[in-house]
Amino acid sequence: MTVEATFKLTPKESQYYIADNNRASITVCGTYFWPHYFKEYEGSFEGQYKMDQVMFSHYHIADSKIDYTKWGNITLVPHIELNYDLTDLGTDKDLSLVIGFQAWSESRILIFSRNEQLGETKLLPEDNQFLIEVECLAPMEIFFIHVNNEDIRHGGNWFFKGITGFVV
Amino acid sequence: MTIIRITAEQVLNAQKAKEKSIMEDIDFQAFEEHRLRSKEIITKQSKKEAK
């Protein structure tokens, strides 16, 4: 059995809107691109636009020691915000979110709501997605923050490719 | 593959937290400390490379 996606958000198609209570969107902050002649073509602005992906660079990582349960702190660092309200689709349903990426090197992501850390994941070159399951469809904001690894200067380089949502 | 689970209670708590103001939340001192730490590491690294 195939389950059809409720929405698919990418950097180019960043909004899904049917009604005020059946919508989802992403906002991306702090991405990076390299000159065309430097490194691989996909790191350039042209390459990223063509491939519908955006890059997060190890040059501009957030400090993992800062308290991101304070929402204001998130606004100052590289992050992706997923904002949705799917309450029109039912009260007894779950939401599964598949976050797509391509990592050039190991990268660390912290996941926050407005008031708490929801989780953490490592993006590895051999993987291309991770999953979030939410047990209700009420309005929610989820923030994905690109932070440093243990060494403060180093994070990783990775591309954000999009978020696909399944209401089940 | 990493799987992260969010409960209905966590969603509700996040909604409540949204009422708070933005500017009061920014931890300027922590960002300044981060900037100084980074600067220190870069300076040390540069000196090491110059030797």
Image (cartoon, rainbow, N blue to C red):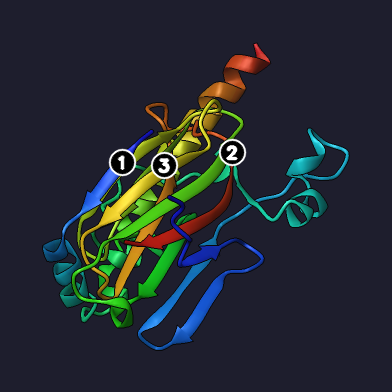
Which residue is the site of mark 3?
A130
What residue is at 51 percent from the left and 68 percent from the top? A27
Q: Are marks 3 and 2 in contact (CB under 8 Å)?
A: no
Figure check: A89 above or below A35: below
Q: Secondary structure at mark 2?
A: strand
Q: Is residue A27 visible?
A: yes
Nearest the camera: A117 or A77?
A: A117
Figure check: B51 above or below A85: above
Instruction: Report the amino acid beneath label 2.
Output: Gln
The residues tagged by marks 2 and 1 sit, at their Cα atoms, a distance apart of 17 Å
Which residue is the site of mark 1?
B3
For residue A99, side relative to residue A66 (left or right)? right
Which residue is farthest top? B51
Q: Secondary structure at mark 1?
A: strand
Give the class, few, some or many, for how many residues have Cα within 10 Å of label 2's Cα (few <14, many ≥20): some
Mark 2 belongs to which subunit? A
Q: Which mark is residue A102?
A: 2
Q: Are marks 1 and 3 in contact (CB under 8 Å)?
A: yes
Q: Disc count in the image?
A: 3
Q: Secondary structure at mark 3?
A: strand
Instruction: Report the amino acid beneath label 1.
Output: Ile
Nearest the camera: A99 or B26?
A: A99
Which residue is farthest right? A37
Residue A114, located in which quarter of the rendered image?
bottom left
Instruction: Report the amino acid beneath label 3.
Output: Phe
Mark 3 belongs to which subunit? A
Quarter of the picture holding the C terminus of chain A:
bottom left
Residue B7 placement (x, y as % from top left): 16, 58
Q: Are marks 1 and 3 on the same chain?
A: no
